Amino acid sequence: MDVEQFRKAGYAAIDRICDYYTTLQSQPVSSSVQPGYLAPLLPTQPPTQGEDFSIIAADYDKYIMPGLTHWQHPSFFAYFPTAASFEGILGDLYATAAPHPGFNWSCSPASTELEAIVMDWAAKLLGLAPAFHNACGTGGGALQTTASDSALVAAVAARERFVSTHSESDAQTPLNSLVIYVTTQTHSLGLKAARVLGLQVRALEVTTEDRYALRGETLRAALEEDLAVGRKPFILMATVGTTSSGAVDNLPEIQAVLADYPEIWLHIDAAWAGIALCCPETRDELYLDAINAAADSFCTNFHKWGLVNFDASTLWVRDRLTLTRALDITPPFLRTAHGDSGAVIDYRNWHLALGRRFRSLKLWFVLRGFGVQGFQAHVRAGIKLNNTFNALLANSEVLQLITPPSLALTVFRAAPKSTPNGRAGAEAEIEKEKDGNELTHLNALNASFFARLARRPDLAITQTVLNGVFCVRFAIGAARTTEAHVRAAFEVIEEEARAVVKEDLEARETATAAVVHV
Amino acid sequence: MDVEQFRKAGYAAIDRICDYYTTLQSQPVSSSVQPGYLAPLLPTQPPTQGEDFSIIAADYDKYIMPGLTHWQHPSFFAYFPTAASFEGILGDLYATAAPHPGFNWSCSPASTELEAIVMDWAAKLLGLAPAFHNACGTGGGALQTTASDSALVAAVAARERFVSTHSESDAQTPLNSLVIYVTTQTHSLGLKAARVLGLQVRALEVTTEDRYALRGETLRAALEEDLAVGRKPFILMATVGTTSSGAVDNLPEIQAVLADYPEIWLHIDAAWAGIALCCPETRDELYLDAINAAADSFCTNFHKWGLVNFDASTLWVRDRLTLTRALDITPPFLRTAHGDSGAVIDYRNWHLALGRRFRSLKLWFVLRGFGVQGFQAHVRAGIKLNNTFNALLANSEVLQLITPPSLALTVFRAAPKSTPNGRAGAEAEIEKEKDGNELTHLNALNASFFARLARRPDLAITQTVLNGVFCVRFAIGAARTTEAHVRAAFEVIEEEARAVVKEDLEARETATAAVVHV
């Protein structure tokens, strides 16, 4: 392909993107293809001779588009938002046009320097303390691919600090004794880090009563128990905004406990909710003060609620030297005071791989394109839409809130009016269900409810299980979602809930009638 | 930014890319900015209000472009090629326009299914055996970000297999006893994997005489030594085409030794050279038969010599279940026969993170755009250009080949005609230098030679040290490099070599004269 052919194909690609976003809301949200749909449609080997791009582009429309789930669809309420913005697309396009592996300063200075600067911009947007800014020279931030990678990087730094601190008294800390702490509500990133590192993991219990947030006393009890038998917890992965329900671990209590265990690294995963910190009114409920005072590392994903196209996970650490010591494979004689002091950052020592893409460019484009007020407006719009959804839910005869809404996330279930626990959604009431068969019954009803929702082409939504309670999650945050989409989604949800509740009542009546007749 | 503003900015971005590649060769290859150049030019925080994209794009030109090193420049001969193609740019653009995190089949079926198909296309392009194809159901391949990530993934799978095999007799294999084997010439990915996993690493010696390739006897001796003292080697990371000199470890010998140690995982890193396997005439020297017979995993980077924009590292494994068992965090009750049999691949269990970009799209675009013949032509052109470079070098009075050229890579140094070892570049001669001061002297001369080359704006080139010998590397493979660029580069190189050799001779004469006069 020569330059003029590329110009033509490039313009066409831009037009295609414009068409995509213009027509997106009239498309089904999810793909309806079946497993294995693609292999029969494509050759089993690459062509011998190169093909014209017009053929390739036509095949994309024919074979790939039908297999895409549209995460940018305004009626996508599943998982978490993976917001795309035009500024983000342009940032990726600029970066991919002149690719380089960015592993150290000299292999492309702009790449390293822009990352250091925009990570500070992002830190300021979220209210992170100067200790986490690159400009301070002791802490700093770097882009990672995902929150899983960020958590793994944090765990490696934590293990290094723990092992090196303890090696004075104990020549070799047995790796088999190390334990990663998460909670039962922590994202799979905790288990994955443990799998990758081959270490033990302990999931601390959280309760319905505490709204699935980790409490200080649970942490202290676990620490005392583990330390007494020689297990060595070295990192706690706490969450600000869990995947299932948006729970926020009680960071002030955790901070107080960890003050007695300074060797334990506190990593905060705020993959989704962290972006909300751009709005000062959220900072108390998300415990920003405790994050700033006590976190060793903090991660949020701009590729979730943060308008930057996947992938753009931001990780900050309080002590960059601990991180770079853990990941640096530069022999000692090549280390420089320059590098250690941060005059020149070599980002290869801040992540798992060697090479890295020029992702700071899209973050820069998006931060500039939206500005602080644009970010705030985006987050506030999501929260407001969720309030609308919750107002509708409060009046429903067949839907029940499971735990108070968290920012732009709501967790609920279908429940008939006759259910003893009523509409309040009080956690204590739900706990009571567990004593009898009622919970089992309602879980089955909700599995059926969710199966109906999953078949709907006009919205996407996900399920979860909260301490044994089968629930449905409604996550707002796609860039193009409006009140009309939320209201339309609610109607679909309520319609399906009515259907399962009606079926359920009829089945119960039939069963009762059968008993009477026998 | 609305759709029409995006269309305008998108067209402009495409035009900018066309201009970039049209004018690239008239630009300096490397950036001349100084560390810290960017911070004074940009604000210290994001703007309060969003900015128009025309301002952002203008700032990109003003502040970012001067800080880029142009890896796509036809006179870029440093590190390894990071080839970009227009098809690759389009693939990234299509993918970034509809971003989704691709962690399992259902979150975007096309993403998973295309990856499985094009990984098989790529395997066939390179001549990998059916055992590595996804279609076979037992082995298969997945895209990773980099060769470092691929090596880390392989090490995790290897550790899992080793530990689970040995846990029957030994309830807990002490992780502290595990050892990763690399050679002194293995890319830093080996050390990095060991750092991340917190495990020991042993770098086996290779000799100048063996052209820096690992021999079977060295491996066997190390294994016997380690096993005798309770250390547990569990993976060997062998290389096909080392970074420094393109050395190819002696895989047939390694295969023979490892036949006696079946618990040891053989990972082949062919990050750069692996792409050359698309040309059947390279397959003997790159030991394809041994790879197909004995490798547990094999990695090459299509983002190096393979025309796909960074990042696109391809990793294949012989036993997918070992890999997914090692990385799977799905609870047992959620595992399905479907998933295990490969009817549905969940790629989240094939890499470190959870989410992943839709990178198979650009690999598909590039494989189709070039075809098998296009790939072969690209690789052969690089090898031919390197032969041209070597023919020029053979006639030089001031340049000396250090080891026979490897594909499109040449390692050489400046050496005056009077140097006793002559022009032949015989490894034995270089070994002799080590007995006296000659090597120290020549190393200093070459450090000065390289410093001169590094200051040149008209080419980029990198240094290395091969068993104590300071060398310069010349790596061909950028998509737009022609014979004229190689000849021009040779002239620059020879000119600088003449200058340092002349200075050196004058200094020696002055010293001799001083001795005579004293």
Image (cartoon, coloured by chain):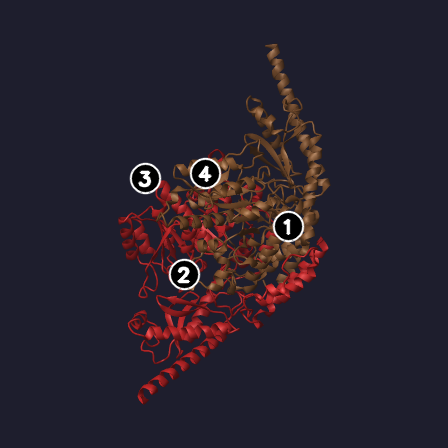
Chain colours: A red, B brown
Distance CA(mark 2)–CA(mark 4): 36 Å
- According to the picture, the residue beneath numbered tag 3 turns out to be A170
Q: Is residue A313 visible?
A: yes
Q: Residue under circle 1? A: B307
Q: Name the residue under label 4.
A: B223
In terms of secondary structure, where does tag 2 sit?
loop
Q: Do labels 3 and 1 share a chain?
A: no
Give the SS element for disc 1: loop
Badge nearest the viewer, 2 or 3: 2
Chain letter for mark 4, please.
B
Furthest residue in direction top, as rendered: B518
* Type of amino acid at the residue the image marks with label 1: Leu
Residue B94 in the image, given as x and y percentages of width and height: 61, 60
Whether residue B230 sits left or right of residue B434 in the image: it is: left
Pointers 2 and 4 in contact (C-beta within 8 Å): no
- Coordinates of residue A76 in the picture (x, y in percent): 51, 68
Distance in Å between CA atoms under marks 3 and 1 = 50 Å
Q: How crowded is mark 4: few (under 14 residues within 10 Å), some or many (20 or more)?
A: some
What residue type is disc 2 on?
Answer: Pro
Q: Do callouts 1 and 2 mark residues in contact (Cβ within 8 Å)?
A: no
| Numbered disc 3: secondary structure | loop
Q: Are marks 1 and 4 on the same chain?
A: yes
Q: Mark number for residue B331?
A: 2
Residue ID at (56%, 33%): B465
**Residue A37 picture quarter:** bottom right
Q: In this view, does B83 lie to the left or right of B190?
A: right
- Residue B241: percent from the left, percent from the top? 59, 41
